[in-house]
Amino acid sequence: MAKKIYKIIVFGPQGSGKGTQAELIEKEYGIPAISTGNLFRIALSKGSKWGKEAKKYMDKGELVPDEVTNNLIAERLKETDCQGGFILDGYPRNIDQLGLIEKLVEPTHVFNIKISDEEAIKRLQGRLSCSCGMVYHNVYNPPKNEMRCDECGGELYVRADDVPEAIKNRLKIYHEQTEPLLSFYREKGVLHEINGERSIEEVWQDVRNILEKF
Ligand code: AMP
């Protein structure tokens, strides 16, 4: 039997846990989770010029210009590890980006992890991040050792955009520019709406059940 090739896009407001679910899919199915936000943060930590350029937008909670982001994704999807499938986390986020991804990818599954703005704010305000891509929450999902990543042992930090003003901006952009893209995938019949206001494990059970049916 031919191997199934999962081409997955995960949508959801900031704090919905879409990154966590993308990581779980990566582990279970052995396909790379591609987070544009993480790619930008890695570029920045390496001191690259365009990483520093992206930081100006990220810190304010604004979208990095499409030219930069589209280029980044087009290049990443050409890499060999993506040829057997992938998960996109945080891309596309506006109509221009949808235009590019439409040319490159016919997704097999699109997930919308839904949470209210109140819940998003509550979660983001306690979020702890690791440069390896793992995320924790100081109340809902604390690391085993204080301020240390369970996976890589790295020191956890609070993201510059996990502060009230940037959070407000990010949610506004999500509702205005990203959410409207969902109707496109709904019409294609590949959209799965998931209640994200539950435990990581419960959300994962739903996601996994859907993927297992493929
Ligand atoms: P995230 O980690 O997904 O919350 O992304 C963090 C930040 O990276 C966003 O607030 C944007 O500034 C930038 N970013 C991530 N993905 C995109 C994208 N698809 N288009 C533009 N900017 C993005």
Image (cartoon, rainbow, N blue to C red):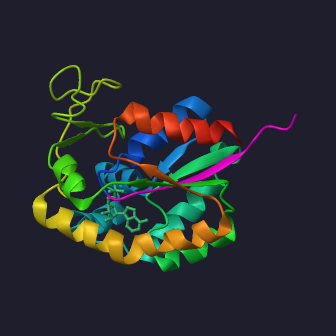
Q: Is residue 12 magenta?
A: yes
Name the one closer to the observer, 149 or 173. Answer: 173
Vertical comparison of 70 with 73: above or below: below
Highlighted range, magenta:
1-13
Residue located at (26% from left, 67% from top): 170
| Displayed-image quarter of ligand 1 | bottom left
Instruction: Tell me the quarter of the picture where residue 132 sits.
Output: top left
Name the one closer to the observer, 54 or 86. Answer: 86
Q: Is residue 10 magenta?
A: yes
Vertical comparison of 43 with 101: above or below: above
Residue located at (53% from left, 62% from top): 73
Vertical comparison of 115 with 85: above or below: below
Q: Is residue 116 visible?
A: yes
Q: Position of residue 176 (x, y in %)?
A: 35, 77
Residue located at (17% from left, 50% from top): 122
Q: Position of residue 169 (x, y in %)?
A: 21, 70
Answer left or right for 10 relative to 45.
right
Residue reaching furthest to the top: 144
Q: Is residue 63 visible?
A: no
Q: Position of residue 45 (x, y in %)?
A: 30, 49
Q: Quadrant of the N terminus?
A: top right
Vertical comparison of 186 with 4: above or below: below
Answer left or right for 77 relative to 162.
right
Q: Position of residue 128 (x, y in %)?
A: 21, 40
